[in-house]
Image: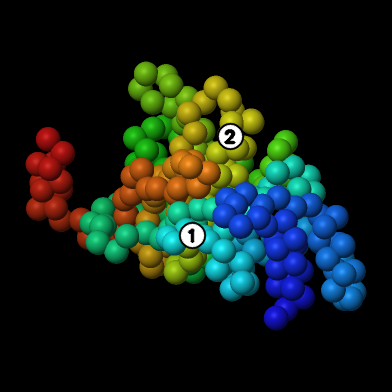
Amino acid sequence: MSKYDRVIEKVFFENYVEGAAKVGFSREELAQSCNDLGMSRIKNLGDIPYTYRFRKELPQSIKEKCPSHSEWIIIGKGIGFYEFRLASPGKIQPSTNRQRIKVPDATPEIVKRYAPGTDEQALLTKVRYNRLIDLFSSLTCYSVQNHLRTTIPNVGQIEIDEIYLGMNKRGTHFVIPCQAKSPGDQFGIVQIMQDIEFCNFKYPNEICKPIALQFLSTNDVAILELIVEERNDIFHLSVVDEHHYKLVSKDEITDDEIKLMSQLDA
């Protein structure tokens, strides 16, 4: 068992009450657990909860304290404070049976040459040049912030890959926080909850539409609108809408395909 596993396990069971759906702890408790376990002090204590929020599975002993069909997540409760909470599910992936909507690829050739691949930056770039957020949301959208890292009250530090502001034909304003993932990764409920909390804090009068983006291949993009609801002290992650797009050259869209789509949209 790693150092991080031993520390997080000790903190959890020192605060856990049988049947609880919430287990709070602080950064000071992480430090005290290091001392109690006789290990050298971990310099960046905040990296311990961060690791289990976004990168690593919790120890099996903690997982066993979950009700069926749920899992523990860790959320921020302010600077230096955290909480284990139950989620169902805690992660989600794009579906595998969606039609791929063909979109003429507007990515500049020079960008394709020097920013190839399927990493998160390449994904955000192609989505931006091809206005896929506009297509997906049926809004006119504008990117206003990339790779935001900030701190918000009652949560702590957060990160958002990209933020769009949008407007519909009636003049209603929307804020659209986006999380981008490489192929095969999952979208975590903690990230979506952070996006929503940020929008509630920074854009209280706009409608928040959290978006998840993922490459399915070099030119295939899945876009999901997600929502988080709390019922009986358990957070639930759900898909509001999902579409898959295929970036192609103009010659790859036939007249028959255009006619068929026109009939379906009539």
Report, in whole angstroms, how far the alpha carbon at label 1 lies from the one at label 2. Answer: 31 Å
Amino acid identity at mark 1: Pro
Which of the image's four quarters has the C terminus? top left
**Tag 1, which secondary structure?**
loop
Point 82% across, 57% down: residue: 29
Q: Is residue 227 left or right of residue 37?
A: left
Q: Mark on residue 199?
A: 2
In the image, residue 31 lies at what x, y percent?
86, 62
In the image, residue 202 lies at what x, y percent?
64, 30
Which residue occupies the foreground of this view, 88 or 203? 88
Amino acid identity at mark 2: Cys
Q: Is residue 206 above or below residue 51?
A: above
Identify the residue position indicated by label 1 in the image. Answer: 67
Q: Is residue 248 left or right of residue 128?
A: left
Q: Is residue 77 above or below residue 45?
A: above
Point 32% across, 60% down: residue: 95
